Amino acid sequence: MNYELLMNKAREAGFEALEIYVSKKLGMQITVFGGEVDQNNITDSQSFTIRGIYKGKMAVYTTEYAAEDPDYIVERLKENAGALTTDEEFAIFEGSPSYPEGRVPNPIFKQIAVSEKIALLKGLEEKIKAYDPRIIYVPHCRYNETNDAVEIVNSSGLRLKKQNNFAFVVAQAVAKEGEQTQSAFTIALKLDYREFDPDEIAKEIGKKVIAKLNAKPVPSKSYPVIFENEAMSDLLSAFYAVFSGEAAVKKITPLLGKEGEKIFSEKITLIDDPLYKDAINYHPFDDEGVASYTKKVVDKGVFTTFLHNLKTAKYFKTKSTGNGFKYGSEIGVHITNFCLTTDEPKKSKDEMIKGVKEGLLITDLAGLHSGVNPINGDFSAQASGFLIENGAVVRPVTLIVVSGNLLKMMNAVDEIGDDFKLFHNNIGTPSVKIAQLPVSGL
């Protein structure tokens, strides 16, 4: 697509501003089942989203064709603008004063033959099966590779481009002992193919699924609870929208009007970090062309800011935080790499366990999509994990429900672990110990 030609034609047609947003995605997916390749797909797609302001109205046109006739695009934009009845004022962002450096894609993924990637999966499947005779089934063993590129060009002279590439392996194992069957997942995310270690992945998932065998509920009551890092990440993922400027505009967040107030324990700091160097997604700018930066959303328990795109920032008469990202054709407010951290002394997970006389280590949460009320912060989720007695893990636990309120829970944080990890949901956290939470079981 000839960007300059399109912008010139739009200008001649009376458009006040124009933006071209280009998204290119190249992906690979390989699955292995029973030692055979079950799926081997390559996807290659691109899309062009053109936004133009015509007589004060913002029109949008999307196409997958780089050779689309610019005259046709301009006419469709004019038609779309003419059909709008809103009185809202629109603007196309001209650009930030400066931008962080982009990430250079790792060429190693293209250099590794597909046959080697298949061999990785076949070897992993065998290693998982061989970990323990109680592992009876490996229903899922998959390799995914992603190469994304985004380019933003506008009539104010802005020219931006960013690229990300990474790969991940997903595996599931099923184990059986007696009449009980348990399953476990693991996801290994890498920015460098050479870092995949099938022995390590097989050991992780094997240990995880075997540890779940012979699980049973515990009596219903309140317990000290340690959320393992992955479970804590899943819980936060159900609530990150409470920090969104969109939720604040709609008045569906318990944090409305609480900026500058203490909402969590002083042990808790939450950071939105689009520039996290080890993350699979690195964002020097958002999808509106706003420069990204690292910001503390909660600083030592004090709520400092909602996350904003240009629209919500305008509503609250503040600046965008660089969190405007596309999902489909709409630009919403989304986290980048959302990290829970602390300035307080950290403890190992084993140290936290040793300090519990009777409590629970929660490793898995389910049903969060339906068990969360983002308006008041209440949650209720199916959980599994381990019973702790006298400072030691004594047995696996399942068929329990853990409930609480996000704000109250995060004010009852006793200890924070030293096992921080950024997960596939773009939320990073260590293990966290909560003083007491109600648990429903037997």
Image (cartoon, helix red, strand yellow):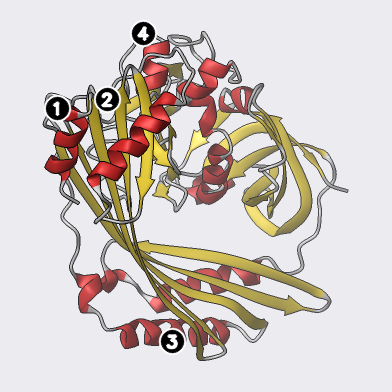
Q: Residues within 10 Å of mark 4 (few under 14, many from 20)?
A: few
436 with respect to 355 (left or right): right
Of residues 426 and 104, the one drawn nearer to the viewer in this rendering: 104
Q: Residues within 10 Å of mark 2 (few under 14, many from 20)?
A: some
Horizontal and vertical percent for residue 223? Answer: 72, 37
Q: Residue at x 52, y 17 (%)?
A: 248
Indicate the quadrant where residue 60 lies.
top left
If you read the primary sequence from the N terminus, does the residue marked by circle 1 or circle 3 appear first? 3
Q: Residue at x 55, y 29 (%)?
A: 413
Q: Nearer the viewer, mark 1 or mark 3?
A: 1
Instruction: Report the Cα–Cα distance between label 1 and label 3.
Output: 53 Å
226 with respect to 8 (left or right): right
Is any part of residue 271 visible from this angle? no
Determine whether label 1 and label 2 are within 8 Å by CB.
yes
If you read the primary sequence from the N terminus, does the residue marked by circle 4 or circle 1 appear first? 1
Q: Residue under circle 3?
A: 123
Of residues 321 and 149, the one drawn nearer to the viewer in this rendering: 149
If you read the primary sequence from the N terminus, does the residue marked by circle 3 or circle 2 appear first? 2
If you read the primary sequence from the N terminus, does the residue marked by circle 2 or circle 4 appear first? 2
Q: Residue under circle 1?
A: 156
Q: Residue under circle 2?
A: 92
Horizontal and vertical percent for residue 253? Answer: 58, 20
> Tag 1: residue type?
Ser
> Tag 3: residue type?
Gly
> Tag 2: residue type?
Ile
Determine whether label 4 and label 3 are within 8 Å by CB.
no
Q: Residue at x 68, y 46 (%)?
A: 360
Instruction: Report the Cα–Cα distance between label 2 and label 4.
Output: 17 Å
Q: Residue under circle 4?
A: 317
If you read the primary sequence from the N terminus, does the residue marked by circle 1 or circle 2 appear first? 2
Q: Residue at x 41, y 46 (%)?
A: 420
